[in-house]
């Protein structure tokens, strides 16, 4: 797909996020404007505290801005109520968080099956979950619960879960941060295989130079402001 034929998936306009603090209002993000096209892979980079994860959460509709808008495929997220935003996330978006957010009472297989089932594709949930757990190197851990897995293994389950529903848009917050070099390299390859195979749009918060270098472009945040490219 040529760049000229790609359509905007995310359009962020005049986005601000402020929070109250004992010393007054704290500016987390200020005047963020950006567009991300379909099938792009975009890295968001910056120092700790620069607002990267906050921006990711706002683009996913997990948080509400002080002002500004986020459009996902032409839908204004903050013109929707929470149920409406949840529907957009369920139908379009996959997530990989630094905290794995696995359900402790479900096995690895069941955790990965869940978003596929919630998307109305129960008939393929088990086979798809097995496929993606195999692709992240966990074919032998299908029946293990999160407490029986290492931190790196839990991260790989979370990544398989994000991929399994085959979202149009995948947000990842430090997806290789809890992984050893070899496994991290495998996950990077998988991220970009999915990007190419399914034209999934990737938006990645990362400190991993190898990961950001493979993206189409990087967005630099500095103290809540987006630096010009």
Image (cartoon, rainbow, N blue to C red):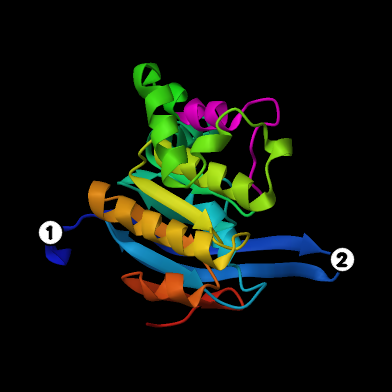
Q: 143 or 62, which lies in front?
A: 143
> Which residue does the numbered mark 1 point to in the structure image?
5
What is the quadrant of the C terminus in the image? bottom left
Q: Residues within 10 Å of mark 2 (few under 14, many from 20)?
A: few
> How far apart, in angstroms, are the residues tagged by discs 2 and 1?
49 Å
Image quarter for residue 23?
bottom right
Image quarter for residue 55?
bottom right
Image quarter for residue 22?
bottom right
**Residue 22 badge:** 2
Q: Are marks 2 and 1 in contact (CB under 8 Å)?
A: no
Relative image position of residue 43 (x, y in whole percent): 43, 68
What is the quadrant of the N terminus in the image? bottom left
Q: 35 or 196, which lies in front?
A: 196
Task: Note whether residue 11 is visible.
Answer: no
Task: Please indicate whether residue 116 sits to the left or right of residue 54 in the image.
Answer: left
Question: In the image, which residues are magenta?
Answer: 99-115
**Residue 97 badge:** none
Q: Residue furthest right?
A: 22
Magenta stretch encompasses residue 113: yes
Q: Residues within 10 Å of mark 1 (few under 14, many from 20)?
A: few
Relative image position of residue 58 (x, y in whole percent): 53, 53
Which residue occupies 43% across, 27% down?
A: 116
Q: 54 or 164, which lies in front?
A: 164
Which residue occupies 12% across, 59% down?
A: 5
Determine the secondary structure under disc 1: helix
Task: Note whether residue 98 is visible.
Answer: yes
Q: Which is more foreground, mark 2 or mark 1?
A: 1
103 vs 65: above or below: above
36 vs 157: above or below: below
């Amino acid at each position: 797909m040529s760049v000229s034929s790609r359509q905007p998936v995310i359009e962020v306009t005049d986005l601000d996020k402020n929070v109250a603090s004992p010393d007054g209002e704290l500016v987390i993000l200020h005047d963020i404007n950006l567009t991300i096209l379909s099938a792009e892979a975009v890295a968001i980079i910056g120092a700790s505290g620069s607002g990267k994860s906050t921006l990711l959460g706002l683009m996913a509709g997990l948080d509400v801005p002080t002002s500004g808008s986020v459009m996902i495929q032409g839908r204004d997220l903050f013109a929707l109520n929470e149920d409406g935003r949840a529907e957009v996330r369920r139908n379009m978006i996959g997530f990989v968080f630094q905290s794995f957010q696995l359900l402790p009472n479900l096995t690895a297989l069941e955790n990965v099956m869940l978003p596929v089932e919630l998307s109305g594709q129960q008939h393929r949930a088990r086979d798809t979950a097995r496929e993606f757990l195999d692709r992240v190197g966990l074919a032998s851990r299908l029946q293990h619960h999160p407490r029986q897995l290492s931190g790196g293994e839990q991260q790989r389950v979370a990544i398989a879960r994000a991929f399994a529903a085959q979202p149009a848009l995948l947000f990842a917050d430090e997806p290789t941060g809890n992984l050893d070099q070899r496994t991290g390299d495998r996950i990077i390859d998988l991220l970009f295989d999915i990007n190419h195979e399914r034209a999934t749009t990737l938006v990645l918060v990362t400190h991993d130079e190898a990961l950001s270098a493979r993206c189409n472009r990087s967005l630099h945040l500095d103290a809540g402001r987006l630096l010009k490219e």
